[in-house]
Image (tube, rainbow, N blue to C red):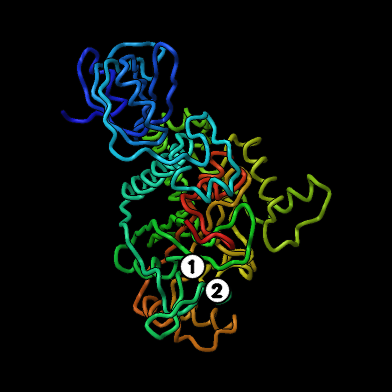
Amino acid sequence: MQRILSTQLSAHVGETVRIAGWIHRRRLLKSVAFLILRDAAGLTQIVVSEKAARAQLETLPEETTVTVVGTVTAEPSAPGGVEITSPVIEALTDPAEPAPFDLYRPDLRASLPTMLDHAPVALRHPKLAATHRISAAAVGGFRTALEAMSFVEIHTPKIVGTATESGANVFKLDYFGRPAYLAQSPQLYKQMMVGVFERVYEVGPVFRAEPSDTARHLASYTSLDAEMGFIEDHRDVIAACHATVGGMLAGIHASAGPSLELLDVTMPALTEKPVVVHFADVLEMISKATGQDVTAEPDLAPAHERWIGEWALREHGSDFVFVEGYPTAHRAFYTHPDPERPGYSRAIDLIFRGLELVSGGQRLHRHADYVRTLTARGESDLSAYSGYLDAMRYGMPPHGGFAFGLERFMARLLDVPNVRQVALFPRDLHRLSP
């Protein structure tokens, strides 16, 4: 008999079926016992009234995996409106050891460190599993949106020979006797691949050896990257990023409805057209609103991000706002300056509910500009950039792109205070297992 999932039971009322999963909870009453079975799709209530089956159930603690054959019976009060009666239960493993916490409770009653220490078990909780179903749907929407715009998925190296983006914050490793590093981002590679496919994207891990022990930093996270060629300026990047975020939200709606409901998620507001404001204007608005002059600030502080996020929601009804024109001196070497506003660039950030989510913008694309910029920033030996600069030497179109961390997006979407709550097995200053 072929196994079916809990969500399929309502189509088989009156039939004998086979289901399988984990014992989520047992309720052993005097006259009857109830077994709540958990599978990948949800929960099933099983009524155990026969003495032999009840005696067997009493020996099988929560989290033991079992298979159950029984009759599907309509019961409005049961999960999905049906339950299994006259069950035959078969254990698929030895009785499970007691879990460190009760997985059957509506919320997991454990501290975050305890949950992370026991992540293989904690992630079985329906609410934690729902978090990662939403995350998977977001990535699916990311891919769907970009492929609809003719982007090609690529997979770039995660072990690199030089620390070209920021030498201080990389993980070093021994690569067959030679020094190597874990990649901080696919930035340079995705720019090179614009010379092949014009439009590329990647979903993959990146590694940051930043000694930051905060609720918003991880040493390894999943980066969602995109890069596109033949653009007019950074506004084309903003348009593509806006459409991509819309595709991610649509993908979540389409694929993760039950998970959204279980977690009571308030989906963010995204306007039809992107809300865009210049960096200098942001500081001017904040200065006027607070009476504190911040117009000379080189970047947006977290308080500034929160302020402009609240402004975008209040004035434009959007949980997302693009900030353009960050000072060139405080952006990466490949950032294209704004020819109309000296000192400012064509860099962008996307602020999501008051938190920087996306960084990107237009890049330099002429070889001579790279040589001049790198030299001006103190790079006397450009051999570390040879492959990258070759792409520019042999002809690259005006291009730009964006990138953001999946975990940071999820933390903001679900309104949780710590990014570790939405990472499967987070890596930070202190955690290297499980």
Q: Residue at x 51, y 32 (%)?
A: 263
For image coordinates 33% across by 40% down, the residue present is 94
Where's the N terminus, which quadrant?
A: top left
| Residue 76 percent across, percent down from the top left | 38, 11
Q: Quadrant location of residue 67?
A: top left
On residue 166, the disc is 2
Percent across and percent down for residue 312 are 63, 40
**Disc 2 packing (10 Å; few <14; some 14–19; many ≥20):** few
Please give left or right for residue 170 compared with residue 6 in the image: right
* Residue at the (60%, 59%) spot, across then down: 325
Residue 268, x across and y down, in percent = 53, 36
Tell me the amino acid under the disc marked 2. Answer: Ser
Mark 1 residue element: loop
User: Which residue ends up furthest to the left in the rendered image?
Assistant: 1
Q: Are marks 1 and 2 in contact (CB under 8 Å)?
A: yes
Q: Find residue 184 and name its label.
A: 1
**Position of residue 346 measured from the top left corner of the image (x, y, whole percent):** 55, 62
